[in-house]
Each structure stands twice: as structure tokens, then as C-alpha cells.
């Protein structure tokens, strides 16, 4: 009995002493937040510290704002490369590599400005490198890293942070060992972090946790991104705001593909400025103006490329023995790597001056690389030429067949007023093998009148084919009496269409009198030529040429549009509301033929960013013709079939994949809604063997209403990989007629 009372007394004494210690530490360090229990789960310790420290910082009023602070980074970057083929030309953010084994060293200084909700801006201040083809802009990707380690995302658009409470359902936390106190450091424990399933959006590694406070003092996390194995090793500060950010960081990246290898080491030394006056500049009159928070975006100072500049700011030695050891290891692996058959061959072209090797290298450069040329000495005008051969210009689908497309870009800017006046010309040309038709366009965009966001747009183009309203009326009469989709489609397939080839000119002027409102007015001119002009077409009453001209007006409204100013021009950022578009167009007859028309269209577009890098796209709209001449063409702006590849992040979103192109111009009205739900962790991406190949998964739900077809619905499931987007679709029409199909849009590492 006495022994039990003695043990209870000792336990009470120990708990009282611990409580006194906690109270003493809290009194002398306002940024130390303690755990509630003696031996909690490790993740609870981390989340409790993060919640408490964020609440404490939110209540401080000393002119500091962790969400809007700035940091200056010094990067020491070493890159070891072994190039054995041209495939690396297509890897995003990968510089052009020289043949053979190389070692490049680069120093970079940059500034990063943080915004609420984990957003950042990045500005390259200085860069010096011995890599001949390495562009300083490549290091701007570090602006995507969230240096606040308790934010939900470790990388803004890629990695779910295991130190955030919201992500705990994706991770397992296990205590590996505890480390006793020494040299006045608190006792820490090492926690292993493992994802609950394999996925590129999740990381694995370990973290050292302060057992008294729950603060992360050090971590190492590894993850996979675009064929690269990346490891981030960071040391976290111990006092004040430094407890929320890394004080030093090292990242390593290893890329291997078909005998090519790129191994990178980047040492990062940040210097933080937590006192930001921008937080006090918010006011209701300009509540959507974020110019003060986007100062790095409007900074147009040139990058300092001087090596002498880094001698004054370098915090560590430029060279160390570790870099030499890594170079020796890579050279040894090149000689002994039996798993790589390319490595077993003698590379006699690396150091040779054979003329054939030089010519082959130049030929590859012309065919596989893009080029940018400065036309003027001050760099105000430049021309961008695409590679002659690139997988991103080749696409195939069942409805569209095989199509090719390429584009040039010409830009002209005034030197001291970049955002106020500039000219962009981006001509493109493509070829559809299914139609055996060349498509071309030459759009010109002139940014003018910056106070009202003025833009003058001119475009000439041609190649599109379509049938006129006279044939559409005949087709509608033939479709009467049929209800099943197969019967309707059979009538369309057997109808002898006489297509016209369109050549058009259009000019528009748009202005924005206030944020979120864009007014556009202009003219359209169409000249259409019958593709197969012969006596039969003439006897059928078809005209050889049909022309029309008329005005077009468009009103676009995005409520609560946030923006920043670059010069006098407003640059849109984002809005939490959808965009509403209204369009009116009138056409008048020219030459021979009754081509007059009047059309009204409306469209609503909404992109909803959900948690864990999920996105919901919603688009709804409709249109109708109030006047139709017998020779007019039932073309719509927001509902059309495009044979050429479009510049969308998702090639399969916003279109009806199984619907024949003939249905797009049959009806005098249409109404549709298209939705796409995108997630990096849905079904197949959770399977270990497929997680590295599948980047995103998507679900599609599209509904259309046109006159003869009635209600048509498409359901689909798609995946996105480094090489292609693919989808399986089913189309459902009246009387439950079901049609199945698939589509593949080829590209290369564009996610």
C-alpha cells in the first residue's frame, strides 16, 4: 500500500515538474508551442504545433506578415550530364545538352515574394553559368516551392505536404527512433513518412521532430516528377518565424532515359524579410488591385550575368570535394553499367572533330530544337521558330484522323514601356490527312491604349470546310421520321454534301473600362468557294462563290476580377466566379447568293480549383439564328468542330468526342453543357505499377441539344501521361441508343 502511494506521489511530482517546465518555456519564448500529451502520435505533434503557431502569428500586430514576406535565394547548382540521344530535347525545363559527359556549374540569385494561400512570384536577379545553352529562366521553377513548410502544398502545383493536417489521410507516420538531449538541444525523434499509396503527388522520407513542441527541425523528402527522382533535404530554423521556413536546403535530381542521364545538385541559402508593408495597403476602393503584392511581376530590370557580382554575395565556397567525387562516380558508372547497352559502346564521337558528326549534330539541332532570334540590337523584337520535327505537332483521333500543325511567333516590344505597347504575330499552318486540306491563319495582336486595356486584333485564315443552309434544310427533311441515332447517322453518311472552303478576314478592337468587363467590336468577312465545282453542282443551283460581311459585338464579364498593373495596363489574375460571355453577329449579302444572317450566342465558363490539386471545369452555353438566308452558313463561335490541334491543357475537354462533325452545322440552335473533373489520385493512378505513368485522371459529362438529334449525352473517362491524353467515351442519344469510342491526343511531356 505504501509502495503504491509512493509511486503515485512520484508520478504527481514528475507531472508537476514537467508542467512548470512547459510554463517557463512558454513565458520566455512566445513562438514555442507545446504538445498536450507526453507520448502523442507524431503527426498530432506536428499538426498541433502548426495550428498553434499559425494562430499565434495571426494575433501578432508588429507589421510582420508571414503570408506576404519576401526572400532572397542564393543557388549553387551543379549539373552532371551524359547525353546519348535526342530524346532529352523534348523534356520540359531541360536545357539543351552537349554530347558526352559534362559538368556544368551555375550560380543564381533570385527573389521570391509570397502571397496568401501559398502563391508566389519569382524574379531572377543574377545568373552566371558555364553551361552554354542554360537559360536563367529555368531556375524560375523554384518560385513554385512553398518555403512555408506547413502549407498544404510543398510545391504549389505538384506535391501534397505531409506536414499539413489536411493531407494526413494520404500519409502514414511512424516513429523510428528518439535522439537524446545534447549541447542544449531539445530531444528530437525521427519520424518516417510513407504515402498510403504510390502516386507522384505524394512524397516519402523522414522528419526530425522536437518532442517538446512538435516543430519540424529537419526533413528529407523524396518524390517523382516527370521522370526525375527528386530529393529535398532542409534544415528548419529554431526561433521565431524561422521555425516556419528552411534556413538551408539541398535538392538532388536524377534523370535517366535511354542512355541519357542528368544528375543535379542545388544548394539553396535563403535570406528572409518577414516585415512587409504590403499587408497594410489593402483598401476597399481598390480591393481587387494586387499591384503592391506583385512587384516582382512588374520588375523589368535585366538579369545580371557578371561572375564578379557573385564574389560579393557568395555565402559558401563555389567548389568542394563532393562534386569531384560525384563526377568520378558517374564516369565509373558509364564504363561499367551493363544494364545500359548504349553505355557499352565506345563513344568515339564525343571528342572527335569528324565533319560527319558535326553535320549530324547541326541537322539534329535544326530538326529537333526551337530557336529564338533577336531582330533588333536592343532585343525589343524577336522571332521564335519551332522545331521542324516534334511530337507535339502530331495528333490523331477517330473523328479527326491524323493532323499536323506548326506555329511561328514574332514579338515586338518598346524597350522602356514593355506592357503598354507591343505587337504579337503568330502565323500557323496545319494539314488534315482526313480532309486532305491545309489550314492556315495569321493572327496579329497589337496592345494599345493601355489605360483601358486596348487590343487590336486582325486575322486572316482559311481551310475550314462546311455546307450551307440550303443543304442543311434538305438534310433536316431527310432526317424527319428517324429517331434512333444509328438511323440518323446513316442518313447523314449517305447524304451527298457539297462543301465550301472558307477564307476569312476579321478585325476586332477590345477594351476594358473596368476590371472584369471586356467589350469587343469588329467585322467579319467570309468568302467561301465550292470545293468541287462542276456542271452537276451548277445544275443543282449551287453557287460557285458565296460571300458575307458584317459586324460582331461581344461582352465579357468576370465578377470580382483580381488584377495587377504593369505600367498602365491591368493584367488579370484570377476570380472566384465564372466568366459570362454574350455575342451578337450580323451578316450581309455580297456578290451572288442569299447569305445574310443574324446570330446570338451566350457562354459561361467556370474553373473551380478544389483541394489536393483537383479541378472541376464547367462550361455551358447556347446559341440560335434569328435570321437565315438560304445560302448562309450555320457557323457558331462557341460550338464548332476543329480538325486542327487546339492549345488546351486537356485536349479532350469541351468537345463531344463521338459526335460527327456534320451535326455542328445542321441545327438553327444549340444548347450544351460540358464538365470535366480532374484529379491526380482517382482510380488507376493509385496502382503502384501505373502511378508513375499516369499523371492525371479525368471524368467527363457532356450534354447537347440540337434540333434533329434531340438530347445527346456523352460520358467519359480519360488519363493523361507524359506522352499522350487518352479517353474512353460512350454516347447516349434518344431511345437509349449507345455508341462507344476512344480518342488519343499525342504530345510529349507537356503536363
Image (cartoon, helix red, strand yellow):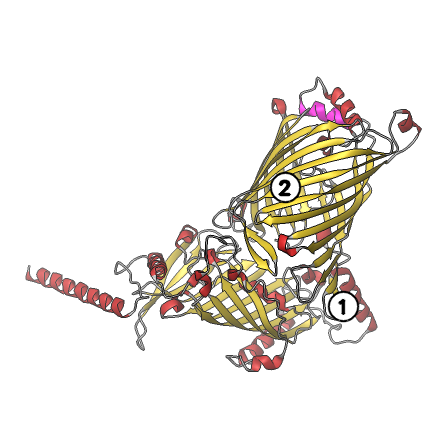
Numbered range of the magenta stretch: 484-493
Q: Residue at x 70, y 19 (%)?
A: 482
* Figure quadrant of residue 350: bottom right
* Figure quadrant of residue 59: bottom left
| SS at badge 2 | strand
Residue 127 at x, y = what percent? 61, 73
Residue lying at the far right of the rendered structure: 535
Disc 2 or 1, which lies upstream in sequence?
A: 1
Question: Left or right: 427 with respect to 190?
Answer: right
Along the viewing direction, whichever of 485 and 377 lies nearer the viewer:
377
- Mark 2–mark 1 Cα distance, whole angstroms, equals 38 Å
**Quadrant the N terminus occupies:** bottom left
| Residue for badge 2 | 555
Q: Which residue is drawn at 18% across and 63% down?
A: 15
Residue 651 at x, y = what percent? 65, 45
Bin the neighbour count of mark 2 within 10 Å (Cα to Cα): few under 14, some 14-19, many 20 and up. Answer: some
Residue 588, compared with residue 445, is above or below; it is above
| SS at badge 1 | loop
Q: Are marks 2 and 1 in contact (CB under 8 Å)?
A: no
Q: Is residue 197 visible to the viewer in this orientation of the structure?
A: yes
Residue 98, compared with residue 474, is above or below; it is below
| Residue for badge 1 | 376
Residue 104, numbered circle = none
Q: Is the magenta stretch mostly helix, strand or loop?
A: helix
Amino acid at each position: 500500500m505504501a509502495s503504491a502511494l509512493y509511486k503515485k506521489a512520484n508520478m504527481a511530482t514528475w507531472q508537476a515538474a514537467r508542467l512548470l517546465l512547459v510554463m517557463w518555456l512558454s513565458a520566455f519564448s512566445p513562438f514555442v508551442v507545446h504538445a498536450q500529451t507526453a507520448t502523442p502520435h507524431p503527426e498530432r505533434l506536428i499538426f498541433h504545433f502548426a495550428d498553434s503557431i499559425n494562430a499565434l502569428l495571426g494575433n501578432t500586430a508588429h507589421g510582420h506578415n508571414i503570408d506576404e514576406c519576401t526572400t532572397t535565394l542564393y543557388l549553387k547548382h551543379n549539373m552532371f550530364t551524359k547525353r546519348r540521344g535526342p530524346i532529352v530535347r523534348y523534356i520540359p525545363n531541360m536545357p539543351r545538352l552537349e554530347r558526352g559527359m559534362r559538368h556544368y556549374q551555375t550560380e543564381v540569385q533570385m527573389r521570391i515574394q509570397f502571397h496568401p494561400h501559398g502563391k508566389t512570384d519569382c524574379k531572377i536577379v543574377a545568373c552566371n553559368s558555364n553551361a552554354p545553352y542554360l537559360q536563367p529562366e529555368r531556375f524560375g521553377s523554384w518560385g513554385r516551392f512553398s518555403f512555408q513548410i506547413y502549407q498544404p502544398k510543398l510545391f504549389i502545383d505538384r506535391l501534397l505536404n505531409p506536414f499539413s493536417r489536411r493531407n494526413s489521410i494520404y500519409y502514414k507516420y511512424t516513429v523510428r527512433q528518439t535522439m537524446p538531449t545534447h549541447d542544449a538541444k531539445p530531444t528530437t525523434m525521427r519520424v518516417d513518412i510513407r504515402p498510403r499509396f504510390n502516386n507522384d503527388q505524394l512524397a516519402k522520407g523522414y522528419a526530425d521532430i522536437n518532442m517538446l513542441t512538435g516543430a519540424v527541425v529537419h526533413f528529407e523528402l523524396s518524390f517523382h516528377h516527370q521522370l526525375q527522382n527528386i530529393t529535398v533535404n532542409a534544415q528548419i530554423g529554431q526561433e521565431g518565424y524561422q521555425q516556419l521556413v528552411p534556413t538551408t536546403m539541398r535538392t538532388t535530381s536524377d534523370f535517366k532515359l535511354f542512355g541519357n542521364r542528368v544528375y543535379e545538385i542545388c544548394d539553396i541559402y535563403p535570406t528572409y524579410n518577414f516585415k512587409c508593408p504590403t499587408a497594410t495597403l489593402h483598401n476597399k476602393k481598390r480591393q481587387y488591385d494586387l499591384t503592391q503584392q506583385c512587384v516582382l511581376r512588374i520588375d523589368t530590370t535585366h538579369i545580371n550575368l557578371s561572375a564578379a557580382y557573385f564574389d560579393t554575395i557568395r555565402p559558401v565556397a563555389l567548389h568542394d570535394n563532393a562534386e569531384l567525387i560525384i563526377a568520378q562516380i558517374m564516369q565509373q558508372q558509364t564504363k561499367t553499367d551493363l544494364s545500359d547497352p548504349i553505355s557499352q559502346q565506345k563513344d568515339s564521337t564525343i571528342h572527335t572533330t569528324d565533319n560527319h558528326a558535326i553535320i549530324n549534330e547541326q541537322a539534329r539541332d535544326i530538326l529537333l530544337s526551337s530557336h529564338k532570334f533577336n531582330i533588333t540590337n536592343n532585343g525589343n523584337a524577336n522571332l521564335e521558330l519551332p522545331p521542324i520535327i516534334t511530337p507535339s505537332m502530331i495528333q490523331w483521333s477517330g473523328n479527326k484522323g491524323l493532323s499536323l500543325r506548326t506555329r511561328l511567333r514574332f514579338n515586338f516590344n518598346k524597350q522602356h514601356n514593355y506592357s503598354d505597347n507591343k505587337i504579337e504575330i503568330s502565323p500557323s499552318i496545319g494539314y488534315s490527312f482526313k480532309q486532305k486540306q491545309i489550314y492556315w491563319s495569321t493572327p496579329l495582336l497589337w496592345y494599345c491604349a493601355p489605360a483601358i486595356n486596348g487590343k487590336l486584333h486582325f486575322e486572316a485564315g482559311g481551310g475550314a470546310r462546311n455546307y450551307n443552309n440550303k443543304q442543311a434544310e434538305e438534310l433536316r427533311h431527310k432526317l424527319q421520321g428517324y429517331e434512333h441515332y444509328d438511323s440518323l447517322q446513316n442518313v447523314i453518311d449517305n447524304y451527298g454534301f457539297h462543301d465550301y472552303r472558307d477564307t476569312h478576314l476579321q478585325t476586332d478592337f477590345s477594351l476594358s473600362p473596368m476590371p472584369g468587363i471586356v467589350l469587343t467590336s469588329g467585322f467579319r468577312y467570309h468568302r467561301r468557294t465550292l470545293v468541287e465545282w462542276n456542271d452537276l453542282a451548277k445544275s443543282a443551283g449551287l453557287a460557285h462563290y458565296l460571300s458575307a460581311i458584317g459586324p460582331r459585338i461581344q461582352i465579357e464579364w468576370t465578377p470580382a476580377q483580381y488584377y495587377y498593373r504593369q505600367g498602365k495596363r491591368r493584367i488579370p489574375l484570377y476570380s472566384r466566379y465564372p466568366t459570362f460571355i454574350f455575342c451578337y453577329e450580323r451578316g450581309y449579302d455580297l456578290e451572288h447568293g442569299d447569305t445574310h444572317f443574324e446570330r446570338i450566342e451566350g457562354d459561361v465558363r467556370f474553373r473551380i480549383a478544389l483541394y489536393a490539386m483537383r479541378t472541376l471545369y464547367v462550361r455551358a452555353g447556347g446559341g440560335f439564328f434569328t435570321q437565315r438566308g438560304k445560302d448562309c452558313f450555320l457557323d457558331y463561335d462557341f460550338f464548332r468542330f476543329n480538325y486542327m490541334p487546339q492549345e488546351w491543357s486537356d485536349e479532350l475537354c469541351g468537345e463531344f468526342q463521338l459526335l460527327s462533325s456534320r451535326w455542328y452545322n445542321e441545327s438553327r440552335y444549340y444548347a450544351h453543357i460540358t464538365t470535366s473533373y480532374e484529379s491526380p489520385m482517382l482510380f488507376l493512378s493509385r496502382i503502384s505499377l501505373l502511378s508513375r505513368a499516369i499523371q492525371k485522371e479525368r471524368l467527363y459529362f457532356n450534354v447537347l441539344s440540337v434540333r434533329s438529334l434531340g438530347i445527346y449525352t456523352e460520358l467519359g473517362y480519360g488519363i493523361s501521361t507524359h506522352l499522350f491524353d487518352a479517353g474512353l467515351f460512350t454516347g447516349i442519344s434518344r431511345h437509349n441508343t449507345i455508341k462507344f469510342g476512344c480518342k488519343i491526343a499525342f504530345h510529349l511531356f507537356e503536363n
